[in-house]
Image (cartoon, helix red, strand yellow):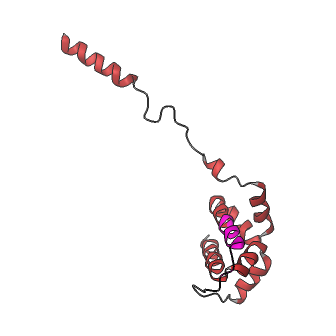
Amino acid sequence: MSRVAGFFIVALVLCGLPDPGFGQSAGPGPTTLATPDADTANVIRLNPTLNSLDRLDPQFTISVVIRLKRIGQSLQDDIRRGDATPTPAEQAQLAANPAFNQAYRNRPDETLHLLRSVNDILSRR
């Protein structure tokens, strides 16, 4: 009889324990992560390439906008780290997208790398 009572008590204790995440916030949900602030939404709206990317992957678009802002606000760098010569198609995109154009003036190599990454994503879908 004591084994049955012991088993019953252990079962009650185990079932009564809270979840490991009990009392913790769930963190940001997918809608929170994909909701841009007003400035980011304006940048996306004014840049056709970012607008197209936003339709495919809103979270990645926000990351690209943040990176473009950082590149655009950073100091101009004379050190070239890669191919900073845009193709004619990339030149057209730089002219049509103010955020990319501003970033390109400060750091051409990083901006072209980012633009090429975005173009690669857009061409896959």
Residue 93 place in picture, x, y as percent:
74, 80
Q: Residue at x 70, y 79 (%)?
A: 106
- Compared with 43, 74 (above or below) is below
Residue 72 drawn in magenta = yes
Q: Quadrant of residue 107?
A: bottom right
Type of secondary structure dominating the magenta stretch: helix
Residue 61 place in picture, x, y as percent:
66, 63
Q: Quadrant of residue 7?
A: top left
- Compared with 34, 7 (above or below) is above
Residue 18 place in picture, x, y as percent:
43, 28
Nearer-the-camera pick, 123 or 53? 53
Nearer-the-camera pick, 47 or 68? 68
Q: Is residue 34 left or right of residue 16?
A: right
In the rendered image, the quadrant that contains the N terminus is top left
| Tally of numbered tags | 0
Residue 57 place in picture, x, y as percent:
64, 61
In the rendered image, the quadrant that contains the C terminus is bottom right
- Compared with 86, 18 (above or below) is above
Q: Residue at x 63, y 82 (%)?
A: 109
Q: Residue at x 67, y 61 (%)?
A: 62
Find the magenta span and give its range: 65-77
Q: Quadrant of residue 121?
A: bottom right
Q: Residue at x 51, y 32 (%)?
A: 23
